Image (cartoon, helix red, strand yellow):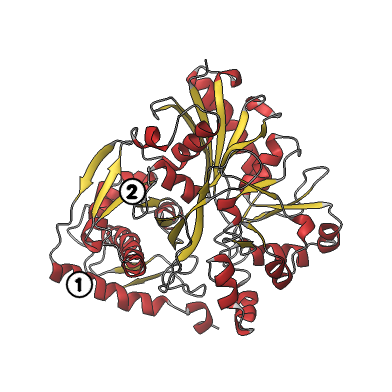
Amino acid sequence: MTEHVLALDQGTTSSRAIVFDREGRAVASAQKEFEQHFPRPGWVEHDPADIWSSQAGVAAEALSRAGLQARDLAAVGIANQRETTLVWDRATLEPVHNAIVWQDRRTSAAVDGLRAKGVESRVRELTGLLLDPYFSATKLAWLLEHVPGAKERAEAGELAFGTVDTWLAAKLTAGAVHATDVSNASRTLLFDIATLEWSDELLELFGVPRAVLPQVVPTSGVVADVTVGPLAGVPLAALAGDQQAATFGQACFEPGLAKNTYGTGCFLVLNTGGQPSRSGHGLLSTVGWSRSVGEDVGPATYALEGSVFTAGAVVQWLRDGLGVIRRSEDVEALALSVEDSGGVAFVPALTGLGAPHWDPYARGAVLGLTRGTTAGHIARAALEGVALQVADVIDAMRQDSGLPLSELRVDGGAAGNDLLMQLQADVAGVTVVRPRVLETTALGAAYLAGLAVGFWRDEDEVAGLWREDRRFTPRLGDAARNEMRERWARAIERSKAWEVTAG
């Protein structure tokens, strides 16, 4: 009897594979970073071959470390970086261009043009999203326009579009599967979240031919058996956007439960139940997951989401860009070398601002520098900047949902940083709860896959496996918190529209 499930967690800067047992414990894991490409300012790309090779490599490595073979796995599930856009040849699986990453801002002008046409309210009504370069539709339109012959080949059915889940599913099945799930489809700006179908109206608006689109399947359900690589023969039983997977992994199964993932960006997700909840404060209405088994997409769980574009990536920048730390984990010690940020404010808008500000032209800013400023002050201000961005999203979510959100479940690599978690509790005025398993994105993919094949019985069984590690309660007084928030608000305003101002 198989006693393990494998999760493939394909992220923005690395690919990960984790083997989980029936208790939701990580038995073995492997991770590999891959190269980021920045061909122009504001442009971010990945080589699709790097995505595939790194993911296949860590899958084999994790199995080996666990002492398992493919036949020992009940299922495999995929959690993926969302919105990142790929187009490939259906017959050869050869990409026509590098993947355009979710952080990429090259389509800002195209988005401005659409907004000027007055279509944003209709787009938001159908998709629950804002018009922003973040999402897949304008990236796909750019590829079809700028790759020679791509539009004609797409219309002829020769090319396939997909987000990263779709790309990996195609590679794992030698092209036999061209599918995405409802959670990833809901992030494309091409999907009607009420009907759970591709929208002809949106396809026409963005100039996307229907022939290029993948089939939409449930988040939890067997798609096919893997036929390629170290996982051949294992049922591919879950496709999930990373933040939806993390919400599931945090057992946020009831409306009102929320989690925040600290990865390359920060993503705060609140379960809103069986109907979309519309936001008046810059949050996104999105599909959380569908657990229907089979090809039909059934009832969905919905969520409100606030997306912060740069979180853990700012630590990577301190490491690789400035060279003030040698390893990412060194940032906590450097930030603790000072008592506070010394009046420095760091706005980590390195690829624009997400919720609730939504400014693709904002850029990173470090303000309040003096002759006494040290690397420690900058490091601490960077961590404060991450926490303050999340606090802005929490404020918006409280206003939209009417819920107090006094407790926040956290995960992702940076959630292991005790200083950052305490800062988060302090600036947002919430209790931060860290689980024993931080990699809840992978855990959620494992749960979704395991439920599809009966490895776990139901959501109640999964919820019973969630375990708390540590709580961080607010220590900062109201006056000090308000002072930090006011300084942050001034700094945010100075970072906005920077690219436009710069000409």
Tell me what residue is drawn at x 76 percent, y 38 percent. Answer: 176
Tell me what residue is drawn at x 43 percent, y 61 percent. Answer: 304
Q: From the image, tell me which residue sits under label 1.
A: 482
In front: 142, or 461?
A: 461
Question: Circle 1 sits in a helix, a strand or a loop, which is it?
Answer: helix
Under mark 1, the amino acid is Asn
Q: From the image, tell me which residue sits under label 2.
A: 410
Examine the rendered structure and indicate whether residue 159 appears above or below residue 232. Answer: below
In front: 409, or 489?
A: 409
Question: Taking 234 as reference, is 399 left or right?
Answer: left
Question: Taking 429 as reference, is 306 left or right?
Answer: right
Q: Residues within 10 Å of mark 1 (few under 14, many from 20)?
A: few
Question: Circle 2 sits in a helix, a strand or a loop, which is it?
Answer: strand
Residues under numbered marks 1 and 2 in contact, where contact means CB atoms less than 8 Å apart: no
Q: Give how far across and how far down residue 52 sits, in percent.
A: 65, 40
Question: Taking 80 as reference, is 397 left or right?
Answer: left
Examine the rendered structure and indicate whether residue 460 appears above or below residue 313. Answer: above
Examine the rendered structure and indicate whether residue 216 appears above or below residue 124. Answer: above
Tell me what residue is drawn at x 25 percent, y 76 percent. Answer: 486
In front: 213, or 471?
A: 213
Q: Quadrant of residue 235?
A: top right
Q: Give how far across and how far down residue 34 sits, in percent.
A: 57, 44
Q: How many marks?
A: 2
Please indicate, yes or no, whether residue 324 appears anywhere in the rendered image.
yes
Quadrant in the picture for the C terminus: bottom right
Q: Give how far across and how far down residue 449 sits, in percent.
A: 53, 34
Please indicate, yes or no, whether residue 317 appears anywhere in the rendered image.
no
Q: Answer with mark 1 or mark 2, whichever residue precedes in sequence.
A: 2
